[in-house]
Image: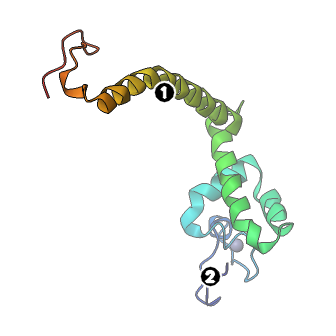
Amino acid sequence: MEGGDPLKRKPCAKCRTQKRKCPEDCLLAPYFPAAKRRSFLSVHKVFGSGKVAKALKGLPEDQRAAAASSMVSEADARIKDPVNGCIGEINGLRAEVEMLRGLLAECEPEVARLKALVETGQAKTDPRPNEAGSPLPPA
Ligand SMILES: [Zn+2]
């Protein structure tokens, strides 16, 4: 994942921030270009840019982009929720999944009832009231 012609390569977000020349072999350049300054500042604040570069260096090249993306997500979550970090987001999503499973379970009997009506051809003449308590309008 190189940025093409090294002569035209722009400095990474760290080198741009520190106003120094970005070396050709800069580990951060492919994953934290100057345009991703906000992402770089997040990982720098949470992990430190030296540790980020060290972590990337220890990985095979084909895994570095995913690792950089993961570090940005982790850092953003940690900044947003300093106590729980990404676990807070995961727990929030788990609670949402449980709530939606409950709603789905509530809907399943109604879906089964409507399917049975369609199968027996009674769907258009159903006098059963809807949730508002009024009879369904004629179809
Ligand atoms: Zn650089």
Residue 22, above or below 103: below
Disc 2 marks which residue?
3
Residue 34, above or below 50: below
Count of numbered badges drawn on the protein: 2
**Ligand 1 found in image quarter:** bottom right
Q: CA distance from mark 1 to mark 2?
A: 47 Å
Circle 2: is it few (<14), some (14-19), or many (20+) Cα within 10 Å?
Answer: few
| Residue 128 horizontal side relative to residue 53, left or right | left
The secondary element bearing badge 2 is classed as loop
Residue farthest front in this picture: 120
Tell whether circle 1 marks a residue whose Cβ is less than 8 angstroms from ligand 1. no
Identify the residue shown where x is 26% and y is 16%.
Answer: 130
Q: Are marks 1 and 2 in contact (CB under 8 Å)?
A: no
Q: Specify the quadrant of the image occupied by residue 69.
A: bottom right
73 or 137, nearer to the observer? 137
Q: Specify the quadrant of the image occupied by residue 79.
A: top right
Q: Quadrant of the C terminus?
A: top left
Q: Is residue 85 visible?
A: no
38 or 136, nearer to the observer? 136
Please provide percent x and percent y for residue 75.
Answer: 68, 47
Identify the residue shown where x is 73% and y is 46%.
Answer: 46
100 or 39, nearer to the observer? 100
Circle 1: is it few (<14), some (14-19), or many (20+) Cα within 10 Å?
Answer: few
Q: Specify the quadrant of the image occupied by residue 4.
A: bottom right
Disc 1 marks which residue?
104
Q: Quadrant of the N terminus?
A: bottom right
The secondary element bearing badge 1 is classed as helix
Q: Which amino acid does the dot numbered 2 rest on? A: Gly
Residue 123, above or below 31: above
